[in-house]
Structures are given as C-alpha cells and as structure tokens.
Amino acid sequence: ETGVTQTPRHLVMGMTNKKSLKCEQHLGHNAMYWYKQSAKKPLELMFVYNFKEQTENNSVPSRFSPECPNSSHLFLHLHTLQPEDSALYLCASSQAGASGGYTFGSGTRLTVV
Amino acid sequence: GENVEQHPSTLSVQEGDSAVIKCTYSDSASNYFPWYKQELGKGPQLIIDIRSNVGEKKDQRIAVTLNKTAKHFSLHITETQPEDSAVYFCAFGGGNDYKLSFGAGTTVTVRA
C-alpha cells in the first residue's frame, strides 16, 4: 500500500448507471488529484483539489463530478458514461507548496458497457 | 499544462544491459524532477527524484541526471533485470505551480 487507497479496484457499469469512485489518503497531504489513464495515451489530469477547494477542472465532461469533503477523501461521481470513458482512473495526493512528488493509488479499472 | 517530451516510447534491452530514458521540459522555473515506475495493474510509484540544485543522483542501479541549461533530464538503469520491465514516466514541477507535468511514458522490456 502506498498510503493512497482507491476503491473499487474494478468497476463495470452500464451507460445509464450511476456509480462513485473513492480515494482516501492518510499521508497528511493537502492536495488531491484525479487522472485518467487510457491505453497508449499519456496521463490526463482531470481535477485538482487544494485544501478541499477545486483549483482545476481540465475541461472534463459534466458526466464526471468530483467531490472533496475533506483533505483526506476524494470522490469521482459517474453518470451516463460513454464506452470511451473506459480507462484506469488514478487518484494521487501531494503536499502543495512543498514542490514534492505525488503518491498514487492503485487505480480503479473502469469498463463502460 | 507544461510540455515534456519523453523518449523513447518503447525500449527493449537484454538482461544485464543498461537502459536510458530522456525527457525534455519547457518551464525553466521548474525545480523538481521525479521519475515514476508503473507495473501492470498498479499505479505509478516514485522511484527517484532530483532537484535543480543537484546535477546527478544515484540509488543503487538507478540514477538520474539533470542538465538545466539544456532543460533535459535522464533516467539510467544499469544491470537491468526482468523486474525492471514496466512503464516509466518522467515529470517536472515546482516553479510557480505545485502541479506536476508528466511525460507520455516509456515501456521498458528486459529480455531474459
């Protein structure tokens, strides 16, 4: 375990379903991130939260809705997804202002059918 | 985000040989340069990092070199082993922004 825990590890959902991805960190970090990783593509930054406030939304479709209730937890709510949204969704955390590295979770492998 | 070019995209080496991956970045204010290793089914894991006040850093078989003038940094893996097979990502950050910018990744395959 890296200190960043993502659940579930795998998720299969239909296009009309609503589901949520969860990320939890116990590292005392104050910044959290959602990334999308598709096959043969670079990591795509989706959302950034700094001290629970969203500081970046990287032109992500509204069918993805993030929530950060506190600096240790981050959610990604999913609804009416498309098959092209199938990917590995990675959560990461860092200490903003410390110019340090990210700690990633193991990701949620999402398949939209 | 800021641009970073990573080469090569794939690298196949014989076990015991060395592997070198190079990244070129755009933001001259960057001062932090980490490297991540991603194995199958896992998230990227930090394996080594370097800050701009240092030109080289080594940790056992892994080393990173930084050339700030040319704005590029490299990962060197010596005496490669099958467990080194993975996808490696470079990143850079610091300056005016705490976020990292990632390279596209290099798939390294070590042949036994």
Image (spheres, coloured by chain):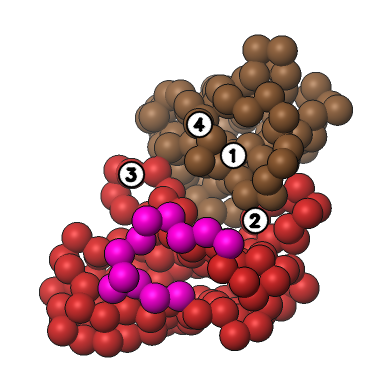
Chain under callout 1? B
Which residue position is annotated with label 3? A41
For the residues tagged 4 and 3, is the chain the same? no
For the residues tagged 1 and 3, is the chain the same? no
Q: In what element is the residue under mark 2?
A: loop
Q: Is A12 rendered above or below residue B51?
A: below
Which residue position is annotated with label 2? A102
Disc marking residue A46: none
Residue A71 location, x and y as percent?
Answer: 68, 77
Q: The brown chain is which one?
A: B
Disc marking residue B3: 4
Q: Which amino acid does label 1 sit on?
A: Ala
Q: Distance between the residues labelled 1 and 4?
A: 10 Å
Please give left or right for residue A70 compared with residue A60 in the image. right
First in sequence: mark 1 vs mark 4:
4
Q: Which of B77 and A86 is in front in this view?
A: A86
Is disc 2 in contact with disc 4, using a CB cutoff of under 8 Å? no
To which quarter of the image does residue A64 belong? bottom left
Residue at position x 58%, y 26% in the image = B25
Residue A28 location, x and y as percent?
Answer: 77, 73
Q: Is A83 rendered above or below residue B99?
A: below
Say if residue B92 shows up in the picture.
yes
Q: Is B33 rendered above or below residue B69?
A: below
Q: Which of A62 and A41 is in front in this view?
A: A62
